[in-house]
């Protein structure tokens, strides 16, 4: 016959932590960045002035996207969706670093 020890508390099982949506958030942000960088490259007519305008347009959209991610992530950190806020902050950092690197690479083509 099996007897439980007396010192074991009757605690309910712990809930698993919510899944980290980092992959989805980063994928969505990189997809958005890819779309506007591709469209701005296709719309350019040619010449160095048009290339500079496209580069400034890409940089503006990149700063806007990073700003939205950082502000949205900072706001979500103070709600019950902290895991999404952390994912948005990290995604904003990654998009900023990789996006400005892509802008510099695009600038070297002109």
Image: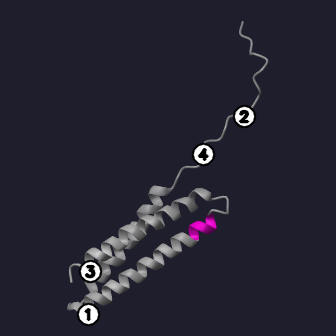
SS state under label 1: helix
Residue 12: mark in rendering: 2
* 30 is higher (above) or lower (below) than 15: below
Which residues are the magenta region? Answer: 72-76
* 101 is higher (above) or lower (below) than 61: above
The prevailing secondary structure element of the residues shown in magenta is helix
The residue shown at (36%, 78%) is 36
Q: Nearest the camera: 5 or 70?
A: 70
Q: How many residues crowd mark 1 within 10 Å: few (<14), some (14–19), many (20+)?
A: few
Task: Using the numbered discs, state the Cα–Cα distance from disc 1 to disc 3 in whole angstroms.
Answer: 12 Å
Q: Is residue 36 left or right of residue 23?
A: left
The residue shown at (78%, 20%) is 7
Q: Is residue 98 left or right of residue 76?
A: left
Q: Position of residue 89 (x, y in %)?
A: 52, 64
**Image quadrant occupied by the C terminus:** bottom left
Task: Using the numbered discs, state the Cα–Cα distance from disc 4 to disc 2 in whole angstroms.
Answer: 15 Å
Q: Position of residue 61 (x, y in %)?
A: 42, 80
Residue 107: mark in rendering: 3
Residue 17: mark in rendering: 4
Question: Is 44 inside the magenta-drawn segment?
Answer: no
Task: Using the numbered discs, state the Cα–Cα distance from disc 2 to disc 3 in whole angstroms.
Answer: 59 Å
Residue 49: mark in rendering: 1
Task: Using the numbered discs, state the Cα–Cα distance from disc 1 to disc 4 in whole angstroms.
Answer: 51 Å
Which quadrant would residue 96 be assigned to in this image? bottom left
């Amino acid at each position: 016959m099996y007897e439980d020890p007396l010192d074991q508390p009757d605690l309910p099982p712990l809930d698993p932590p919510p899944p980290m949506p980092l992959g989805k958030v980063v994928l969505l942000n990189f997809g958005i960045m890819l779309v506007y960088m591709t469209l701005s490259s296709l719309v350019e007519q040619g010449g160095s002035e048009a290339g500079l305008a496209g580069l400034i347009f890409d940089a503006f959209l990149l700063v806007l996207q990073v700003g939205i991610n950082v502000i949205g992530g900072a706001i979500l950190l103070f709600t019950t969706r902290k895991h999404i806020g952390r994912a948005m902050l990290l995604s904003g950092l990654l998009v900023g670093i990789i996006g400005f690197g892509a802008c510099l690479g695009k600038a070297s083509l002109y």
